[in-house]
Amino acid sequence: MRNDGEVKKKNNVLKNIQYIVRMVNEYDSKIIVFGMIRNALEKGFYSFFFVYFIMFLYDLIEQESNYTFISIFLGAVCLAQIGVYILSNQHDYYVQVNTPKIVQGIYLKIFKQALLIPLEKVENPEYYGKYTRALDNAQNSIMQIVSLLGDAFGQIIRLCLLIAIAISIDPILLLFPVLCIVNSVIVSFIRSGVEYRQRKELSEYERKCGYCKRVFYERKYAQELRLYKIGDKVTDLYQNSIFELQRIRKSYLLRLALFEIWDKFMLRLCLLVGACIYLAYKVIVLKVLSVGEFAGAMAAISNVSYCTGFLSYYLGELFKQGADCYNLIAYMEDESQDCIKENEGLDSFPLQRLDIKNLKYSYEKNGTLVLDDVSFAINKGEKIAIAGYNGAGKTTLVKILLGLYKEYEGKVFWNGISIGRFNTKKYKKCVNSVLQDFSIYELSIANNVTMSSSVDEKEKIAVALKEAGVWDKICKLPKGIESSVTKELDPEGVNFSGGELQKIALARIFYNDNADLFILDEPTSAMDPISEFNAYKNLFRKLKDKTMLFVSHRLLTCTMADRILMMDHGKIVEQGSHEELMKLNGKYAEMYRIQSSKINSIMRAM
Ligand code: ADP
């Protein structure tokens, strides 16, 4: 894979948080503000109740005030508490109801983005990790950021009120909370950096563990795990990864614990004791403060200490989640710099001639050329076969013609215009294909043929399946083309053999024969020879006037083509009709003879 030129952006936490806020606002513009108001009122009330109210009460009692007045005051405070409680409940309910809407919206955004990312990037082993981390952010970090913004805002309001109360008693008291806040912010900032580094180191081994877990539950590995001992190797990989995870966690444990001890116990304890000594001196020695003021000031200072504890925790978490969201933002932003421009480019038009000129491609930067100066032309209506041994570069060539790979040297001209200049969507409409590693979706047979949600043309779908040679089985199913393929999501689904699934995939070509260019990469490799012969016979009849390029490792089918391109080590080494290439007595003739002798010996053995 080529170097994907990843943009190494600085992970700016505040910008990340801003980005997430904008993203959330797209789906719900009230949720963040509502959370802030709820927290501000709730925490503001606590400052009032636990500090100002206590001071006020002490002074009333000291001044022997009217009992009725104290009772009315208490009643009013209780009513305010009920109001705050109702508001908090309303907010909790609002968050619960609206969270799925936001998370789903962001998930859909990621899915859409995934479709825009060029195949070259998707095939990079790092891509899977980037994608899953982005989904992980959408699932976990976003709503945590929403909640933490409210929590942190509430604590800031609480802190301001507490400081205001403390200053109103004695401005010197400001010194204690300020020291406390500065300490907490510095500690949480340094700690979040350390935690981020730890998570980065952990992520490699978490990915490996995730892979090992997948191997033991995904169906595609089930057979081989039972037939070979490869499971032992995967288990080793899992154990080593767990060992590494523990080692990394241990190496960070002491540092993180020290931050905790310093933040939670040492400094705050010192400040509380310091403030207490200072206030006691003013009450007892200088006699300039009342007992109520002493109680209020001490309550304010101790609340400041709790409040800064919470604030530092919330800010630390906010930094952590903001830093983590880099994965989602990098996925949505950096990758999109290379994304296929969906809305730009020329319209493509009926194919007259396709020219492939000096095509060169390698999967790695400065790596071996998988395609090495490939040039050929196809005229409208021609049927071209590509033959060659494994690894010759046939599939890579097909993927370039389909517009899936972009970073190649040379040109592909469609009626003389480079395919890179066409609008991607419109180009895709002109080219229909079935690939070697096609996918079958856990949906209905009809969806798997039309490859869309529209399955109205039932007759057309049935005809396509008939032409692909799989109708005999499907027409007997109780639900016909509505049957699900495989039983994974539908217990009434039907399991098909590899050859039958290939026929369903091939039906896509018969169903959508409006395209100009048809590209088939070994679409019949799992079929028996008779099915393959019939499938090709039907294809040639159906696409009589269309242009077709097909890869086949069975040279018998290649004989049906107008022209055969023989590929070897990324080059076209021979081209011509079957007869011409046999006369040439080169690579193609050699391969053909080997295949024919194999067929003959099998026939003789039968
Ligand atoms: P063919 O279809 O003729 O068998 P391919 O085009 O699939 O050949 O592969 C040509 C070469 O490119 C092979 O050596 C293969 O290992 C390599 N290759 C194919 N796909 C990838 C990929 N996604 N990443 C890296 N190398 C690849």
Image (spheres, rainbow, N blue to C red):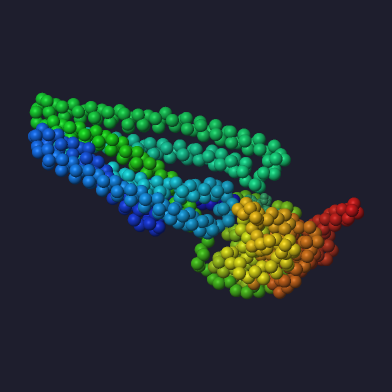
Name the spot of residue 231 as percent of width and height, x first. Answer: 66, 38
Residue at the spot 59% in from the left edge and 43% down from the top edge: 214
Q: Residue furthest front?
A: 68
Name the spot of residue 222 as percent of width and height, x first. Answer: 67, 44
Tell me: 278 left or right of 537.
Answer: left
Q: Give above or below for 575 relative to 136.
A: below
Looking at this view, is 79 or 238 the one in front?
A: 79
Question: Residue 372 lies in what quarter of the image?
Answer: bottom right
Q: Give above or below for 279 relative to 11.
A: above
Looking at this view, is 74 or 588 the one in front?
A: 74
Can residue 364 be seen?
yes
Q: Give above or below for 22 relative to 191.
A: below
Q: Residue furthest right?
A: 604
- Total number of numbered labels? 0
Residue at the spot 55% in from the left edge and 34% down from the top edge: 242
Tell me: 239 left or right of 273.
Answer: right
Q: Residue furthest top?
A: 285
Residue at the spot 77% in from the left edge and 67% down from the top edge: 537
Can residue 520 be seen?
no
Tell me: 515 left or right of 390.
Answer: left
Question: Residue 459 lies in what quarter of the image?
Answer: bottom right
Residue at the spot 39% in from the left edge and 39% down from the top edge: 192
Name the spot of residue 175 as percent of width and height, x first. Answer: 20, 35
Tell me: 43 left or right of 588.
Answer: left
Name the spot of residue 326 as percent of width and height, x first. Answer: 44, 48
